[in-house]
Image (cartoon, rainbow, N blue to C red):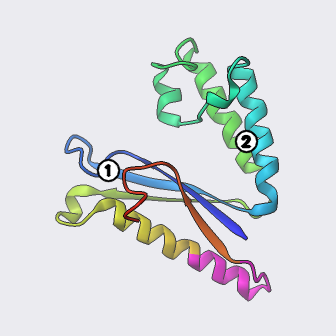
Amino acid sequence: MHLLYLDDAGSAKNPGEQYLILGGLAIYEAQVDWVTRQLDALAETIDPNTPNSVEFHASEIFSRRKAPWKGMSRDEARGTIKAVLKVLASAYDSARAFACAIHKNSYRGADPMELAFEQLCSRFDLYLSRLRQDGDRQRGLVILDESAHETTL
């Protein structure tokens, strides 16, 4: 089974934001454990007391306004992002990044989250179709991070 974990950046209803971004990582289920262990080890270096509370959201890391990122220098924050990307880059050949940016004003009257979700599901399906052509008969599962849209999608 190939798992596609999605998370959003931005708010569909916030008029102050021009874009809504939905993105994520697809990975073969047997490799999730390895990625999780690597990210957990990185989280322990950032917050040894409560590593389970560390979430690697790029905007929070770069802004350095909230714990555990608040005390970091700009270079340390960039190093953290690079370390996360290094884990993902070394996550076997099956790992694939998916993302969709929706310019909200270009789609007035439409729900940007639904548009982004539809686009990513379509691309994930195309990815699985290409794998099927090479003999990989695994299915796919989409996993959404906690969101205001999780029940409607």
Determine whether, in the image, residue 149 is placed left or right of residue 51: left
Find the magenta span and give its range.
Answer: 125-138
Q: From the viewer's perspective, is residue 8 above or below residue 43?
A: below
Horizontal and vertical percent for residue 35? 76, 47
Q: From the viewer's perspective, is residue 65 above or below residue 125?
A: above
Determine whether, in the image, residue 14 is placed left or right of residue 152: left
Q: Residue 2, located in which quarter of the rendered image?
A: bottom right
Horizontal and vertical percent for residue 56? 59, 35
Image quarter (top left, top right, bottom left or bottom right) of the C terminus: bottom left
Q: From the viewer's perspective, is residue 80 above or below residue 89?
A: above
Hey, what amino acid is under mark 1? Tyr
Dot 1 corresponds to which residue? Answer: 19
Determine whether, in the image, residue 35 is placed left or right of residue 143: right
Q: Residue 22, located in which quarter of the rendered image?
A: bottom left
Q: Which mark is residue 86?
A: 2
Picture residue at 29% right of the left edge, 52% below the top:
12
